[in-house]
Image (cartoon, coloured by chain):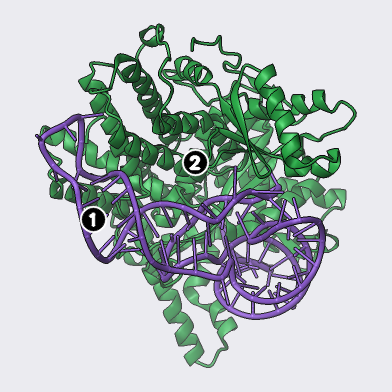
Amino acid sequence: MGNLAPPFFYNYFYTKYHRIPMTLFNQTKHAVASALKHLFPDTEIAASMIQVNLTKPEFTGDYTVVLFPFVKLLKMKPDALGAQLGEYLVNNTELFGEYAIVSGFLNLAIKDGVWAGFLQNNFNNRTYGEQTAKDNRVMVEYSSPNTNKPLHFGHMRNIFLGSAMSQILKATGNEVVKANLINDRGIHICKSMIAWQQYANGATPESSGIKGDHLVGDYYVKFNDIYKEQVKELIAAGKDEKTAEKEAPVMLEAQAMLRKWEAGDPEVYDLWKKMNGWVYDGFEVTYKQMGITFDKWYYESDTYLLGKQMVMEGLEKGVLFKKEDESIWIDLKEDGLDEKLLLRGDGTSVYITQDMGTAKLKYDDFKLNQSIYVIADEQNYHMQVLKLILKKLGEPCADAVYHLSYGMVELPTGRMKSREGTVVDADDMVAEMVRLSREQAEENGKTEGFTEEELVKLYDTVGLGALKFYLLRVDPKKKMIFDPKESIDLHGFTATFIQYAHTRICSILRKEGMPLMPDTSVFQAFQLTDGIAPMEKKMILQLEQYPNVLAAAASEYNPSELCNYTFQLAQTFNSFYDVHSISKAENDEKKQLRLMIVVMAASVMRHAMGLLGIALPEKM
RNA sequence: GGUCCGGUAGCUCAGCUGGAUAGAGCACCAGCCUUCUAAGCUGGGGGUCAUUGGUUCGAAUCCAAUCCGGAUCACCA
């Protein structure tokens, strides 16, 4: 069988709302639709009725059309319809070689030559699966730390999720701005500052040798210890709990400090700047180690005034109202929610005030079509309220707001609480994973032929890869439980597994003297005469799915789809590797076919994992 | 109590716009390294898809009710 001029090359279908990659899978759907239209011109058949699946391995064929949905509409028995449809598709398209009907399912086999053409056209396509630019500007905000404590394991889920989604959206044709909103003001910062003033004796990161974010975090914990103690004392002195919490001296001091800060008191301002500087230095080290970057930084200290201004305008417009104590509120009762405070009686702003300002600022800065907030699901209500308030105030940014909500990372004993010292620190976790990858490599005798420098880099790649994969492989909206006592496995459904499969491919290519991305001309003369073995076919079928998987990861806001897909691809490759030799292939045709498969598989693995920020080494 | 999310193998999770015998990984058992890297491969045991009812040719998937777990409903951020 000769090569067919590929009828499909890289392109898209355009429907009213979506752009769909023109994979063979999607072409099959299309072909079925037009076949039905041709065979039954008088019957209107909705596109949603056409269901195409991958054919189950126990049957022959590649793609399967489910016939039942048409039975009633066309008043035909499924098998009769299948025969007519199959016959038409085989005779009138270039795609299908044969068909078979098994109890209500029409199994279609794509011609081997079409598969060969698919490989020849895509094996070295670096951007395989990506979509062309579509003039859609998206901001993804993630990380968004408070400046009163270091990053912990739960933040890492947020950071990796936001970073991965940015990359995925970019690859699917969006213009993406990666934003980090630093929550650098508010009562929580004042708590660290008060405790530091009273107990640190002027300690700095330099003088103490403690990383800046950790140092500030230590005094945040200290504040809470003092506060708890004072509340206890007040209760012992006869106050009820609520009053005690309100009147604890250290809390009053923190509140006074916040007012001073908002009034621009120079002494408070200097301390605030100094301590935030320490924290930023610490964060920078952590972000760098994790390979995380941002395009745009926002600071709530810059946006809360805009928020206040919006509140004042809302008050003038009559959308908001004032209570006796001068505090300003919005009434959301008719939307099934409650009254919500937007500005305190003393004029200081609350969480949502600054969020309003930031939302508007982001929108105005970049003329966004979409503004994605990666924030834990405990804030679902808050985000709902934010969007609603913006809408009521008539802000155009309201419609762009999208909350990418994810479940919290919990310990077997429950939530991580910095006050109770149960947090798993981000820096510690990275170090632990790097250590674990070293231990495993040494145990397996995998260190031969590497310099110490190469090993350090490799352990970084493996350890960090495992961590990212672990946090991204679960559907974001589900909460996950992490047991720090059981360290993360490097076997099974992990990045290490994929990295290992990739190094095996690299090893094959080295042996064959072939680069990772050979030139198109290398397989130009390839002719398929032999047919395709089942394992080879399985690889090709999975490679063919990638554009659809990437598109789904983008539209569902779910990077775990890439984890699942790539793991399956690596799994199939490992089985393929076991049954088919490349260096000792039966003949040159087989060698070439398998080389194309393997080159493309490695490329797709690098692409998919690259979007998640996971590197694949060439040797390990 | 209101709203939202979840409940699939011992554990961690896929599958959820209804389709063929419900899948992986870990753990457990048995095999496979003179042959491209065994961080791998092959096989095995393990399931009332929380429960009940409904919708239909067909339900883990859709609908309703119930049970269990979590989040949230702050002048904290």
What x and y, as percent, mark residue A232?
A: 46, 85
Percent position of residue A508, x then y: 25, 25
In what element is the residue under mark 1? helix
Residue shown at 80%/42% (left/top)? A71
**CB under 8 Å between callouts 1 and 2?**
no
| Labels 1 and 2: the sequence-earlier one | 2
Q: List the residue tagged with mark 1.
A: A208
**Please, is residue A351 above or below residue B9 in the view?**
above
Identify the residue shown where x is 84% and y is 28%: A40
Q: Secondary structure at mark 2?
A: loop
- In the depicted structure, whether residue A253 falls above or below residue A11: below
The purple one among the chains is: B
The shade of chain A is green
Residue occupied by mark 2? A57
Q: Is A162 situated left or right of A68 in this image?
A: left
- Nearest to viewer (mark 1 / mark 2): 2
Asked which quadrant contains residue A136, the reply is top right
Quick check: can you spot residue A450?
no
Residue A261 image point, x, y percent: 54, 54
Tell whether A226 sits left or right of A550. left
Front residue of A431/A520: it is: A520
**Chain under callout 1:** A
Residue type, label 1: Ser
> For the residue marked with disc 2, what is the amino acid?
Pro
Residue A425: image quadrant is bottom left
